[in-house]
Image: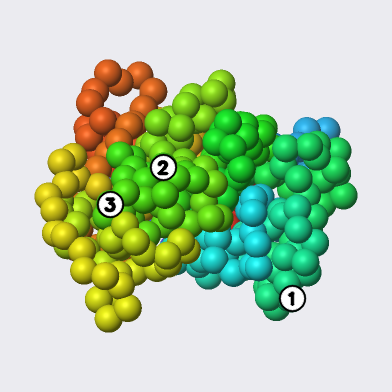
Amino acid sequence: MYFRINTRKHVAVVSAVALGLWMFHLQTQLIKNHTNKMETMNLRSMNAKMTEQLTLLRSINANPRQKIDTKTNDHPSTESKAPVQLPDGYDVLDVGSSKGGGSITFLASAVSKLRFIDADTVERLDARELGLDYDQTKVDTCNAVEKDTRNDCRLFNILSDTESDLSDIGTRTISGNSYWHVLEHIPECDMAEEMWVKAAAFSKRFSSFHGPAYDNEMTAAGEEPTGVHRFWENWSGHTCHFDSAMMERAIRAVPKTTAFVVINFGKMSTTDHDIFVPADTPENSHHYDPETMSARDIEPLDPPLYEEMRACAIYDEDPEEHMSLYAALCLLDSFRRPHRLFQMDQQIVVCSVPGAEVDDDECATTLKAMAESTIRRFEQLHTDDVLLSI
């Protein structure tokens, strides 16, 4: 028994089955391709959204105070902020600026030596000093000398004039004041100490001092010399022999003082130095000249004497944690040996630093390290951040 196969019908059936299988494969492939395409589109959409969110986060990090409109989902503005600019005015009052130059250049000179990471920091700090003097002739001379600088001079009496008399100088913070070779010229030493206190009231961050050393004076003010003496002890213009005890008393009379140091420079253990002149040397003479002055005895000095005194008082509330840039510069100036006395020893007369019961030498080491650390920190700040601290 056998079956008869209809060849034509069989071929048709096979072809139909093959066609059905091919169409099923094609449909499956189309569905797969469509799925891949959708996944690709979804991935692209997800990447776009992630990129959008990252852009938003970067903008927020760059300007955390910038507000975002959560309703419209607008991005914060990417426009740069306007640079910080200090208001007009002066950073330091140079009391007794006399004929200009010298002390009135202190701050600008100190700032110019700093190595900030931004090239424009020194220029934008625009360090300026206002010289004060009660002699109009000296004020005129001072302005002539300073005409090509950013400094100015004006008539002002630190004892009688008030803050309102400086109301027209601008709104910049007056960081400090300087008394360089001034207080020894004041008629009475009590008045000199009062002047220190008065100038401190105008100053937010520091007071700076330079002057001749008078500790253990050999000739009192206004008296005839009886022996060898430092030549400036017999000057008619030095009516107040302003010594370290007076300096410390004046500093401590300012309640807002948080740290200070007083230093004598140029240690001398004998009179074999040209600043010592014999008793019969005329008043207002200078260094010893063996050709024009009488012979002098070389004598040991016990205690030793010094040539120059420097001091700095700080008014920052917490100098250990937040010392200001200009206060640090004042301190470093007080620690810097005068060039002519570079090879000679110094004496830390008195020092005070907050929160530490240490001797004067250790105190000075700590205070100097704090100032140096402050300078390094500010040198690593960008210009706007430096200016915001002034």
Q: Earlier in the sequence, mark 3 or mark 2?
A: 2
Q: In this orientation, does residue 357 appear?
A: yes
Q: Quadrant of residue 307?
A: bottom left
Could you tell me residue 188's position as x and y percent?
A: 59, 37
Q: Earlier in the sequence, mark 1 or mark 3?
A: 1
In-image side of 293 versus 303 (left or right): right
| Along the line of sight, the residue nearer the viewer: 325 or 314 | 314
Q: Are marks 3 and 2 in contact (CB under 8 Å)?
A: no
**Is label 1 in a helix, a strand or a loop?**
helix
Dot 3: within a 10 Å radius of its alpha carbon, few (fewer than 14), some, or many (20 or more) residues? Answer: some
Residue that numbered label 2 is attached to: 220
Q: In this orientation, does residue 378 appear?
A: no
The residue at 58%/31% (across/down) is: 190
User: Where is 105 relative to 50, above or below?
Assistant: below
| Along the line of sight, the residue nearer the viewer: 348 or 135 | 135
The residue at 66%/68% (across/down) is: 99
Q: Please name which of the two marks, 3 or 2, marks the residue nearer to the observer.
A: 3
| Along the line of sight, the residue nearer the viewer: 218 or 54 | 218
The residue at 22%/26% (across/down) is: 359
Dot 2: within a 10 Å radius of its alpha carbon, few (fewer than 14), some, or many (20 or more) residues? Answer: some
Q: How far is mark 3 from mark 2, CA to CA?
A: 12 Å
Q: Quadrant of residue 366?
A: top left
Q: Earlier in the sequence, mark 1 or mark 2?
A: 1
| Along the line of sight, the residue nearer the viewer: 372 or 19 | 372
Residue that numbered label 1 is attached to: 144
Image color mode? rainbow
Q: How far is mark 1 from mark 2, CA to CA?
A: 37 Å
Q: Please name which of the two marks, 1 or 2, marks the residue nearer to the observer.
A: 2
Residue that numbered label 3 is attached to: 227
The N terminus - image quarter = top left
